[in-house]
Image (cartoon, helix red, strand yellow):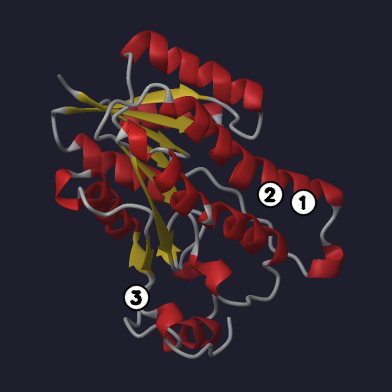
Amino acid sequence: MKKVIVITGGTSGIGLATAREFAADSNNQVIVIGRNPEKTQRVSDDYPELIPMIADLSKVSEVKRVFEEIKNQYKKIDVLFANAGFGIFKQFNEITEDDFDRSVSLNYKGIFFSIQEAVSLMPKSSSIIINVSWTYHRALTGASAYSSSKAALSYLPKVLALELADKGIRVNAVSPGYVITEQFNEDQYDKDRMNHKLEGIPAKRFAKAKEIGTVVKFLASDDASYVNGQEIVIDGGLTAVQNNGD
């Protein structure tokens, strides 16, 4: 029987790259959940090996609806990559209530309830991987709303590894550093600022989205069968060295 892989925020960036890694194995059925109908349609057109679904996961009613759809069509979930996220970067005193609510609703509440819905469909030896972020490991100006929501999220792998142990479900996290995506890439920075960022990364480059996907795929595999409740920081060494600024 084929494995069912579900990736939230799976229509671009890290989510899409990870989906393509899983889909390279013909034994996997890979469902990608996106919020934007146009983007989701493009994924459907460009990557017929993927199964796109549309849902706004910041709304619990939408979370319940899309996972009920998965239950009805595919019966189970073997791997959940809880990847959907949203970034607002402003100074602390500029954050509005709407900014705060939007950040928490997707980055924390949406992930929390996506996992809750998925668990009832997950057989023994299945796996959950949560996308957190390197940013909560370090003070980063303008990241108070984003990073604090990710810090809340970072606790889930620990407690869920314990609470879901009797179900045989492993729960781990990845925390990517700077990753080249459509929304974030070197073209956004002038040469001096780009060089400044690279000075703080021992690897001297940003990650490719695929490099995050391969770690997620490892954590979901039998090769990681004794890895549980852990977080792997994939940042080229960024958080291992003294902070040289953002």
- Residue count near mark 2 (Cα–Cα under 10 Å), binned few <14, some 14–19, many ≥20: many
- As drawn, the label of residue 100 is 1
Task: Identify the residue at image location x=30%, y=50%.
Answer: 216
| Element under disc 3 | loop
Q: Residue at x 47, y 20 (%)?
A: 67
Q: Residue 157: horizontal and vertical position, in percent?
A: 45, 51
Pinpoint residue 13: horizontal percent, then vertical percent. Answer: 42, 49
- Label 1 to label 2: alpha-carbon separation: 5 Å
Q: Earlier in the sequence, mark 2 or mark 3?
A: 2
In the rendered view, tell whether residue 223 sits above or below residue 180: above
- The residue located at (34%, 56%) in the rendering is 209
Q: Quadrant of residue 80?
A: top left
Residue 231 in the image: x percent, y percent?
39, 60
Q: Quadrant of the N terminus?
A: top left
SS of the residue under disc 1: helix
The residue under the point 40% across, 47% down is 161
Kind of residue sitting beneath label 1: Phe
Three-letter amino acid code of the residue under disc 3: Gly
Q: Residues within 10 Å of mark 3 (few under 14, many from 20)?
A: some
Name the residue tied to disc 3.
236
Q: Are marks 2 and 3 in contact (CB under 8 Å)?
A: no
